Amino acid sequence: MTFTAPTTEQLFVLKTITGIDELAGHERFAEATPDLVDAIVEGVGEFAAGEFAPLYRLGDTVGARLIDGSVKMPEGYAQAYQHYVEAGWSALSAPADHGGQGLPFSLATVALDSLGAANMAFALCPILTVGAIEALHHHGSDSQKALYLPKLSTGEWTGTMNLTEPQAGSDVGALRATATPRGDGTYAIRGQKIYISFGDHDMADNIIHLVLARTPDAPAGTKGISLFLVPKYRLDADGNPGEANGIKTVSIEHKMGINASPTCVLQFGEEGESIGELIGPEFGGMRAMFTMMNNARLNVGLQGVQIAEGATQKALWFARERVQSARAGAGRDPVAIIEHPDVRRMLLRMKAGTEAIRALLYHASGQVDRANLGVPGAREMVDLLTPLAKTYGTDLGSEIASLGVQVHGGMGYVEETGAAQYYRDIRIAQIYEGTNGIQAADLVGRKLGMAGGDVVRGLIAEVQADAGNHPALAALAGDVAEVTEYMVAASVDDRLAGSYPYCTMMAVMTAGWLMLKQQRAAQAMLDAGEGNADFLKAKLVTTRFYLERMVPEAGGLKAAAMAGADLLYALDAEALAA
């Protein structure tokens, strides 16, 4: 099977859901003309298929390796990464005044969609660099921006986020890494960080670590955390990488998947001094961290789309090739399994689900662009959509990858077919950048209360107004409205107990609304004789499948969302473990 980027689908969603033409009407994004957008989407799709996709299997079977204290990527990765930098794909949405192209974030989202569908683990490296760029752009000093942003924007240097420690995972406030003033405005960083994706590799000249640590006498908890810039190599007088900066790669994790992404344990300041610079004000680390993580969470949700796309393409290819049994009631000759009803059910679910989460992520990316333009209400919408996109994108992406294994039957459980790699690779996305349970808790703990609940109510009202007489979507929106009012009045425990099903309901409602928009746009184009007729006819079927088969399922979560916490604590911990 040869991977092909879904460029027709991507361009359709960009226009009908993201509103890329409207964004280009703003002076800031005036260069995002239809011709340029088409060229970028098609160009990065061809690049992904030609450079990233051929390395996907090798990255899994060989993986990143720690050799003599340094991480060595599998053969071909460094060369492909250099081609990625040279082609300018890293710089699409990076700030124009620091080496980037200043194009919409939504266009960079499409690029990552293609790159990650071709090779999810490899595309994780650019995602992390985006987070470092965001933090420096919003919180760094002028000199830090001038020194680091140009190289990060082009991808010549890569970035990381160093949050987690052995005793401090989701509880960031428990971290112990220290930052001691050196008397010249810099700090000596000391401590261990774990789960650092691309914490070391051999693809770039420097790696810029953004490290959370505590200064002397810092307050306990999250209030005492600061953010520091700690390069792998210190810069010389000309701004070029010089001597090593006392960062040791202790080990890399042996993981279930994403084996081409080195997940490092890093030790700062143990073998030589590790020198860092404060980013933003002292004790401003949490604010800067959320700047890093917010768009990163959307990009992790996008990983669900990436894997869903790759797994669906592979399953469709296999289902057309695999001949097995006669179709019931249609003669005695064996047929390709794509002709069997249950396989069709799985494949349509995969295809429709992939399109639904793509629409959700592309819609959120468009709201990021509008927030950056200062459009009223856009920032609040990004805040609301982020937990929905991260949670549902990765949940459904994982389900689709699992269905891909199922379509392959017994061969799906055999590693040589490659179906299992998609399943193994995507499973981490439900965990990192804040587990999906934490995202759901964030929805009911922070996002539900925005503007006294009116931001959530506004989204529901917009869906209800647009749903018209579509029965399933209208019914789900009504259920979400009812659960929302329950959540607003519920105790903290009851809200949290129902947060996950509520988050899923709201995400499916939003995705269903976006699929309905696509259905109407596709029908209008067909009626007008515009566009690719075969693609548009397929879009009518996949949107129908999602709206008629998948949207009604979410209504069944209403009872769990409103059940409260009592039953969860009916057994104490010992009885539960008995």
Image (tube, rainbow, N blue to C red):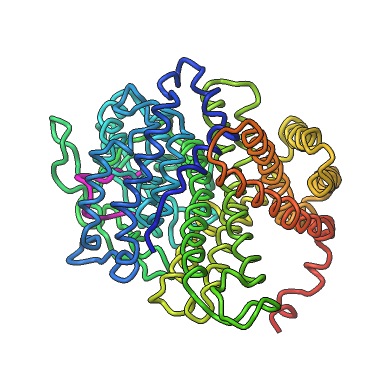
Count every numbered label the image shows and give the total: 0
Residue 251 lies, with reference to residue 389, above or below; the image says below
Q: Which residues are drawn in magenta?
A: 198-211
Q: Is residue 255 magenta?
A: no
Residue 164 position by quadrant: bottom left
Q: Is residue 204 magenta?
A: yes
Asked whether 127 or 289 is in front, the reply is: 127
Please identify the quadrant where the N terminus is shown: bottom left
Asked whether 311 or 102 is in front, the reply is: 311
Horizontal side of residue 294 vs 452, given as left or right = left
| Residue drawn at 52 percent across, 69 percent down | 319
Residue 559 position by quadrant: bottom right
Residue 303 lies, with reference to residue 525, above or below; the image says below
| Residue drawn at 74 percent across, 30 percent down | 451
Asked whether 524 or 463 is in front, the reply is: 524
Q: Is residue 235 visible?
A: yes
| Residue drawn at 56 percent across, 68 percent down | 402
Residue 124 point in image, percent of width and height: 39, 51
Q: Can residue 224 be seen in this view?
A: no
